[in-house]
Image (cartoon, rainbow, N blue to C red):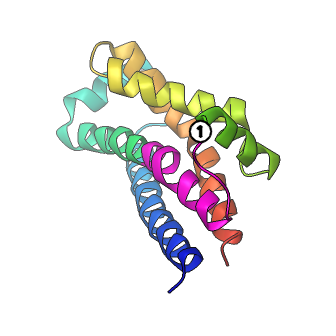
Amino acid sequence: MGSQDLDLVKVQHNLKEGFIHLKRVDEAIEEIERKYHFPINATDFEKILENRIDLAFSDQIIYRFSKLQDLIGAKLFKAFLLYQGENVDRPFRDILNRFEKIEILNVEEWFEVRHLRNEIAHNYESSQNIAIEILNGIFETRNDLRKILVKIESLTK
């Protein structure tokens, strides 16, 4: 098995894991939407907090989204570039610019997703308003991550 074959295996493994995270986000959103509607408002969020099952789905949305964003940014991008025979030993902004050039992502949208991920890491439990913003942001941006996965998958077939 050659180097490019090994790189392809890494890309495929990362894609598989990414689609699993995305599926879990989608499933948890579906469960939340059985009772509430996005965008979530403060009244609905209070009800979510009072119901352990709804809260578990809310936490799953946030956890899996974080895992997905981390996987794409830390593993999938580099594995894909290696598969393409490109150098990955460069600033992350240059990697993002390359992905924008080959129409896999929009750099500004990526930074919005990254900002959302950072809010999760630093502020999720500190404020209900921030938690509501995070849930609504995930609802709005999860398809940006879906598009990245689908596009990379199509370029590795």
Q: Which residue is mark 1?
A: 141
Question: Which secondary structure class fits the magenta region best?
Answer: helix
Q: 124 above or below 57?
A: above
Residue 78 magenta-highlighted: yes
Quick check: 37 left or right of 58?
A: right
Can residue 39 be spotted in the picture?
Answer: no
Give the quarter of the image for residue 110.
top right
Query: What residue do we see at 33% from left, 38% from top?
Result: 58
Query: What residue do we see at 65% from left, 33% from top?
Result: 93
Quick check: 1 left or right of 54?
A: right
Residue 63 at x, y percent in the picture: 33, 41
The residue stretch that appears in magenta: 68-90
- Would you call the spot at circle 1 few (<14 residues within 10 Å), some (14-19), or many (20 or more)? some
Residue 48 at x, y percent in the picture: 29, 31
Can residue 74 be spotted in the picture?
Answer: yes
Foreground of the two, 114 or 134? 114
Give the quarter of the image for residue 126.
top left
Residue flagged by tag 1: what amino acid is it?
Thr
Query: What residue do we see at 56% from left, 44% from top?
Result: 142
Query: What residue do we see at 71% from left, 69% from top?
Result: 155
Quick check: 34 left or right of 139?
A: left
Residue 32 magenta-highlighted: no
Give the quarter of the image for residue 119.
top left
Residue 135 at x, y percent in the picture: 44, 31
Foreground of the two, 12 or 65? 12
Residue 78 at x, y percent in the picture: 55, 53
Q: 59 above or below 126?
A: below
- Report helix, strand or loop for mark 1: helix
Quadrant containing the C terminus in the rendered view: bottom right
Foreground of the two, 110 or 91? 91
